[in-house]
């Protein structure tokens, strides 16, 4: 056993000495060798590490791509049904807007007979109808007069007729006995042209009323001339 141990020990010592000599020989060359090997290895290790990265990016990209197309078509489909009902709503509102054209049309003069009541509806900013043909002793009733009134215009009623001045926001009715043209306005809404003409019987004062309006009325009051020009003497 001792022989083997001594042989083994001597062998180890011999190998150690050989190694020490090798280190001494290579010690001078080590300085240049390590730098060359170091840059080469890291460059190789980095490049292999880089390739695996692209596949990861590619896997992420395809995942994100399917998500965006799915979400995009859904929002696009949702807004479509909404605009449709929205477009129908304004279409429904348009017909009522055409209604205001009604006041432009004049009602025919009623035939003689018992006294009648003629209703004038105060709509948004217009009297409907804005020109009313009645017979002497007939009654005119203004309704829906919230925020409106009816005031006869000086110089635009027949001689001998009684002017009137309604209360703001109150419905009213008057009975007209004197034949002729009567012009009136809604005081708060003169600027909107909210005014009207009442034609009683066979008026003799149409020319006189037009002349007075053109001569005396100022600003928005003059819009009554447009209505006076539409009057057709029965
Ligand atoms: Cu008014």
Image (tube, grey):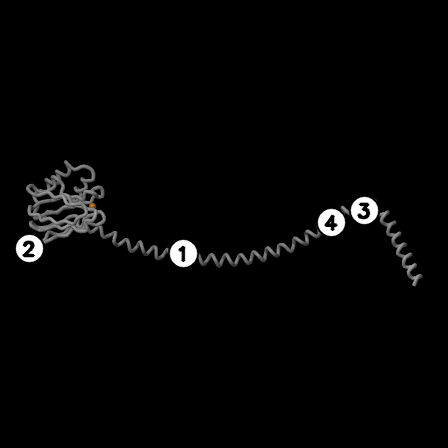
Disc 1 versus disc 3: distance between alpha carbons? 74 Å
Q: Nearer the viewer, residue 10 or 141?
A: 10
Q: Which residue is mark 3?
A: 30
- Percent position (x, y) of residue 221? 18, 40
- Percent position (x, y) of residue 201? 7, 48
Q: Which residue is mark 4?
A: 40
Q: Which residue is mark 2?
A: 114
- Percent position (x, y) of residue 105? 17, 50
Q: Which image quadrant: the N terminus?
A: bottom right
Q: Which residue is mark 1?
A: 79
Disc 1 versus disc 2: distance between alpha carbons? 61 Å
Q: Residue at x 22, y 41 (%)?
A: 191
Q: Give the mark, 3 or 4, whose residue is nearer the N terminus.
A: 3
Q: Residue at x 47, y 56 (%)?
A: 72
Callout 3 crowding tier (Cα within 10 Å): few <14, some 14–19, many ≥20 = few
Q: Give the mark, 1 or 2, whose residue is nearer the N terminus.
A: 1
């Amino acid at each position: 056993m001792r022989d083997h141990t001594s042989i083994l020990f001597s062998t180890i010592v011999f190998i150690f000495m050989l190694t020490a000599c090798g280190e001494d020989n290579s010690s001078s060359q080590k300085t240049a060798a390590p730098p060359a090997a170091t840059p080469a290895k890291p460059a190789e290790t980095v490049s292999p590490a880089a390739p695996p990265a692209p596949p990861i990016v590619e896997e992420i990209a395809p995942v994100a791509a399917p998500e965006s197309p799915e979400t995009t078509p859904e929002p696009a489909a949702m807004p479509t049904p909404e605009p449709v009902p929205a477009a129908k709503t304004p279409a429904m509102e348009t017909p009522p807007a055409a209604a205001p054209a009604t006041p432009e049309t004049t009602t025919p003069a009623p035939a003689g007979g018992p006294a009648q009541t003629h209703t004038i509806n105060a709509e948004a900013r217009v009297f409907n109808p804005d020109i009313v043909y009645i017979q002497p002793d007939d009654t005119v009733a203004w309704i829906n007069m919230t925020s409106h009134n009816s005031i006869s215009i000086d110089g635009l009623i027949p001689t001998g007729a009684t002017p009137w001045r309604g209360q703001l926001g109150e419905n009213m009715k008057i009975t007209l006995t004197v034949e002729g043209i009567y012009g009136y306005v809604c005081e708060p809404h003169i600027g909107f042209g909210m005014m009207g003409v009442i034609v009683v019987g066979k008026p003799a004062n149409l020319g006189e009323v037009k002349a007075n309006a053109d001569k005396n009325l100022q600003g928005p009051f003059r819009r009554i001339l447009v209505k006076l020009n539409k009057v057709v003497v029965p």
